Every structure is written in structure tokens, then in C-alpha cells.
């Protein structure tokens, strides 16, 4: 069983539990959140959120630029937490 981490959405004040083998967007939707998305495959940037704390694995993210990564942005449609995470959403 994969390790589970807390993902906190700072602006909405919602915290959910997401396993390392689950996608943040999918679990947020299961919790009733309505977040922007389009492709669900890391090929657009509609779901992009700024990660304020923690580490997100997003190996399949093709559309995000190096500059966006440096600024802390992550694609949550294919992003899985590797630690407790705080997103600016």
C-alpha cells in the first residue's frame, strides 16, 4: 500500500489525504472540490497550481516549462504527493 500524505488547498482551507500512487486532482474531485482541468494527461496547463510547500511527483508533465517549475507550479492532474503538500488553491 502506498504512503498517504496530506494535501492542503490554502485558499479554500480544505485538506485531503492523497496516496503517492493517486493523482491530486482526482482525489480533490472525490472530496467535492471543483478545480480547473482539461486534458488529465499533463499535456496542457489548465490544472496548474502553485505548490507552496512539499514535493509533487509529476513525471508525465510535458506542457509545463522550466520557468514555471522553478516558480513552484505543478500539474495536479498527473501530480502525486511525495510529502505533505500545500497548494495555493
Image (spheres, helix red, strand yellow):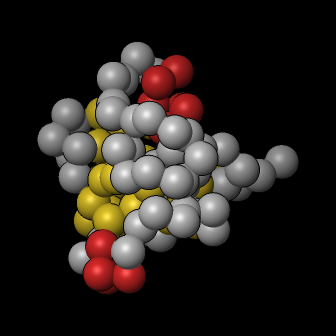
Against 32, residue 24 (above or below) is below
- Residue 4 relative to residue 50: left or right: right
**Does residue 34 appear in this view?**
yes
- Residue 26 position within the rendered picture, expressed as x and y whole percent measured from the top left: 55, 32
Residue ID at (38%, 75%):
65
- Residue 59 position within the rendered picture, expressed as x and y whole percent measured from the top left: 63, 68
- Residue 36 position within the rendered picture, expressed as x and y whole percent measured from the top left: 33, 33
The number of numbered discs placed on residues in the rendered structure image is 0
- Residue 13 relative to residue 31: left or right: left
Q: Quadrant of the C terminus?
A: top left
Near-viewer residue (35 or 84): 35
Residue ID at (59%, 47%):
41
Against 43, residue 53 (above or below) is below
- Residue 25 position within the rendered picture, expressed as x and y whole percent measured from the top left: 48, 38
Against 72, residue 18 (above or below) is above
Residue ID at (33%, 31%):
35
Amino acid at each position: 500500500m502506498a504512503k498517504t500524505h496530506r494535501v492542503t488547498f490554502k485558499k479554500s482551507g480544505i485538506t485531503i489525504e492523497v496516496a503517492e500512487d493517486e493523482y491530486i486532482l482526482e482525489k480533490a474531485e472525490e472530496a467535492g472540490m471543483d478545480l480547473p482541468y482539461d486534458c488529465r494527461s499533463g499535456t496542457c496547463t489548465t490544472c496548474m497550481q502553485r505548490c507552496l510547500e512539499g514535493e509533487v511527483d509529476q513525471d508525465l508533465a510535458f506542457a509545463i516549462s522550466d520557468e514555471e517549475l522553478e516558480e513552484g507550479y505543478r500539474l495536479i492532474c498527473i501530480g502525486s504527493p511525495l510529502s505533505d503538500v500545500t497548494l495555493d488553491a
